[in-house]
Amino acid sequence: MTESDALLATLRQQAEGATQLNLAFIGVANGLFDALAAEAGSPEGLAARLGYDPAYLRRWCDAAYAFGLLDGEDDALHPSPMGALYRSGQPGWAMAAGGALSAHMAERVVGLMRTGERPGEALLEEKASIAALFGPMLEQGFTPMLGGPVLRSVPVFEELLQNDALVIDLGCGNGWYLRVLAQRFPALRGLGIDGMAENIDGATASAEAAGLSARLRFLRGDVLSLGPTEPATLIAMNRALHHVWDRQSDVMAAIFDRLKPGGAAVIWEPAWPADPRSLRPEGRPGITWNNILEHAQGNHLLRPDEIAAAAAAAGLVPTIHPVGFDVVVVARRPA
């Protein structure tokens, strides 16, 4: 086999994998893997249970079986071991949602590259089936990191949150970050701020379902327009700072003002390197794709030293904590 033949074979495998991911997204968005795991059945029976069109379900089940996502006889189909990875809470679930988002954004970037337009975060809301999964996708992808390597690598959490403490999460999304911290630190009280009403509604409902509504509340607002509140022990920004980097001075000043003396901002971001060419030998091509998507939204990913410098300019004392390919910058207000 020539080098060209080998490359072509690889390309075909990648194309088939992309098709499988698209097929899986349909199953994820419509709850098909979960439904068949709960009760094996035929396409027609599945359609009757879920209220979907039986002809579409028949064709989806045929394709899912052919791609190895379903096993069983025609009247008792169920997720294969591969298909089970696309059930709610499993790793494939977030991958399928992210793949659909990437495909949508790729199509939009084709035109945007020609005009130079940067429509902003409204791009994420253009496809309802994808937008509905965005918050849960982030939660599933990053909850293990927060509960594991981030908490282990950043001692300020254990230092500040053992006793009664107010944590403000700026750009809280569906509230997953505060829920993780509230379950870890029983004395914590949390306030989540987000600009999207649907995020606030979802965060409030999820906190109630987790039995945390007495300790967590969520308000719609801008990171700079938060009304009077008690000084915060900790202010969190999880992958949010690069969305407001054009207002970095105002954001850092607001963080300084809202922190109690000795309190800390914890800013978690993808770590953009000083030399993007280093990303290839480091095996990190995915972050460059993310930066294209961020550019279309009017943003760009940040270097750790940029974040630290902005914090220092506001009178905060920064320390940089690498966490895998991400970075957590802790910015303390002097006591």
Image: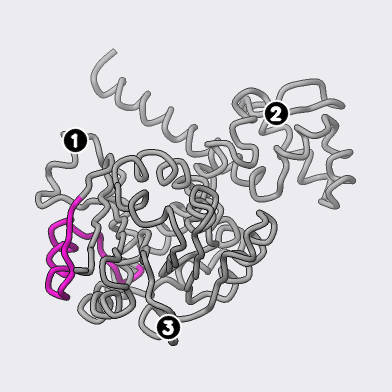
Q: Position of residue 195 (x, y in %)?
A: 48, 77
Residue at (47, 45) in percent of width and height = 141
- Mark positioned earlier in the residue sequence (3 or 1): 3
Using residue 13 as the reference point, say whether residue 215 is left or right of it.
right
Label 3 packing within 10 angstroms: few (<14), some (14-19), many (20+) = some
Secondary element under disc 2, as helix, strand or loop, is: strand
Q: Quadrant of the C terminus?
A: bottom left
- Mark positioned earlier in the residue sequence (1 or 2): 2
Residue under label 1: 282
- 50 or 165: nearer the eye? 165
Q: Amino acid at mark 1?
A: Glu
Of tags 3 and 2, the one toward the viewer is 3
Label 1 packing within 10 angstroms: few (<14), some (14-19), many (20+) = few
Residue under label 2: 79
Secondary element under disc 1, as helix, strand or loop, is: loop
Magenta range is 297-320
For the residues bearing labels 3 and 1, Cβ distance under 8 angstroms:
no
Residue at (31, 72) in percent of width and height = 298
Residue 226 is labelled as 3
Q: Position of residue 281 (x, y in %)?
A: 16, 34
Q: Amino acid at mark 3?
A: Leu
The span from disc 3 to disc 1 (Cα, nearest Å) is 40 Å
